Amino acid sequence: MLYSSIFRLFAVVAILVLAAGPAGAATITIVNNDSAGEGFNDPSPADPVGGNTGTTLGEQRLILFEAAADQWGALVESDVEILVSAQFNPMTCDAGGAILGSCGSTYILRDFPNAPFANTWYSAATANALAGSDQDGRTDITAQFSSTVDDDPDCLGGHGWYYGLDGQPDQGDLRQHLYPVILHELGHGLGFQNFANESTGTLNGGLPDIYTRFTLDTTTGKHWNEMTNGERLASAINTDQIVWDGPFGQAAAEDWLAAEVIDFIVNSPGSIAGTYDSTGALFGAGGALSDDTTGDMELVDDGSGATASLGCDPLVGFTPGRIAFIDRGTCEFGLKALNAEQAGASAAVIANNQDGTVLVNMAGGEVGGQVTIPVIAIGQDDGNLIRPELPGVNVTFDVLSIWGMHAAGFPKLYAPNPVEMGSSISHWDVSAWPDALMEPFTTEDEYNEVDMTPGLFEDIGWTLAGRDLIFEDGFESGGSTGWDITIP
């Protein structure tokens, strides 16, 4: 027997902190709830920007929404059209922060045909996809976005929304990207949300939802569906200890997140053998480092003579399979690593060129997103010790911690104290790095990547369109390749 419940607690994107598809793909359709002359129907003239060809404000908003819907639709499978009721409304905003949007499942369902768990709530879109037919007949997702960002000169400095599809506003442009906000909110509507009340600890109708079944408190060892109301109430503010332990979400997080602290172990020669400090790059393979990458090192040669070890040009004569030793300087870290990877390097070590043993947090620059091999940084003194021994140096990378991952090996969920209704639990933790789309705060790094979110989607019941073509053998180690679905 099918049970349905209206659920209108929107999962909020939270306060802004300034600092043709595969077979089976879903169709996600906007149901425009704006009145004439406003929101998606705003006739105000607008110049095309960043690949958005709309000539009115309303048209540009619709184009962005449809692009985001197409991006998610290309990823998840459903034979049932997913209807999203959407509109622009005034929302809280001041000079320092704003609520940019909100979204959630319009209703929730349990005990529908093909439900993986009995007596368990699912978001409408997920339930319909699993059942193979529309179970309720209403719009499935309800979303709203801030009109205040454009309309109020006191909101975020009066800069307004950026409506481009390219993720590249002019240098110095302080407008807020709308595209990733839409992408984020649709992620909530598709199921990245729980239906428990974090301020009381109660479950909806006294029954768990699919999200709570994978929400684990590492202190108590209990999932949220196994707790009493009082235990859930305490767990909701157990900061840094609440994780997602679904197997697909865990694997996707390992694939996406970067290593935070790494032991760089020199195995040979004996004269310099030992453990050295190092840090992981903020790009390239992150969790893949936990596989204990081991290999022989080789000094790179980019053919530039005296500066050949900088690796700023394509490498010459590099032995494929070895770990590249590269000196810092002149060009971006991401370019150095990409040149090494394209020459066949299995990993890269970049030695600092200043400040003694001080390490650096390496950003990838323009091409860092293309790097899939592990990349680490070591200090200048250690680099000077190792360089003369090359190529006779064998090393191991031993990851001690990963950004946004608990020591138990699971990605953290956002659990601030006090509770933030609409944000607590239904987001990845803010310690994730690289930044994840489904964190509670927007960052300048987010644009069109859905990063580790599809792993969580698989855990809650979604089938991913074309997944077998993306991953031949489960989750791919060494980079975020599989989840980087670009705008159609």
Image: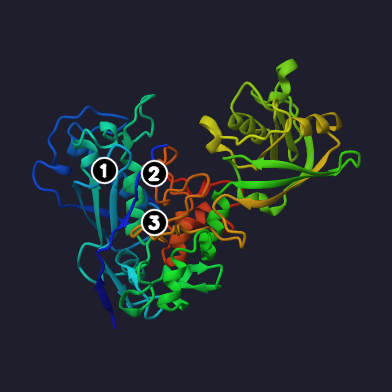
Q: Secondary structure at mark 3?
A: loop
Residue 370 position (above or below residue 76): above
Q: Nearer the viewer, residue 1 or 236?
A: 236
Among the two numbered marks 2 and 3 on one chain, the one whose residue lies closer to the N terminus: 3
Mark 3 is on which residue type? Ala
Q: CA distance from mark 1 to mark 3?
A: 42 Å
* Amino acid at dot 2: Thr
Q: Amino acid at mark 1?
A: Cys
**Location of residue 254 (image quadrant):** bottom right
Quote the CA–CA distance across marks 2 and 3. Answer: 32 Å
User: Circle 2 sits in a helix, a strand or a loop, which is it?
Assistant: loop
Q: Quadrant of residue 165?
A: top left
Structure colour scheme: rainbow
Q: Where is mark 3, residue-wise?
A: 23
Label 1 sits on residue: 93
Position of residue 141 in the picture relative to residue 344 (left or right): left
Q: Which residue is the site of mark 2?
A: 442
Residue 396, which numbered label?
Answer: none
Quarter of the picture holding the N terminus: bottom left
Location of residue 312 in the rendering, given as x and y in whole percent from the top left corner: 64, 24
Q: Could you tell which of marks 1 and 2 lies nearer the N-terminus?
A: 1
Q: Which numbered disc, 1 or 2, marks the residue closer to the eye?
A: 1
Callout 1 environment at 10 Å: few (<14), some (14 to 19), or many (20+)? some
* Vertical arrangement, residue 214 with respect to residue 278, above or below: below
Residue at left offset 36%, top offset 58%? 420
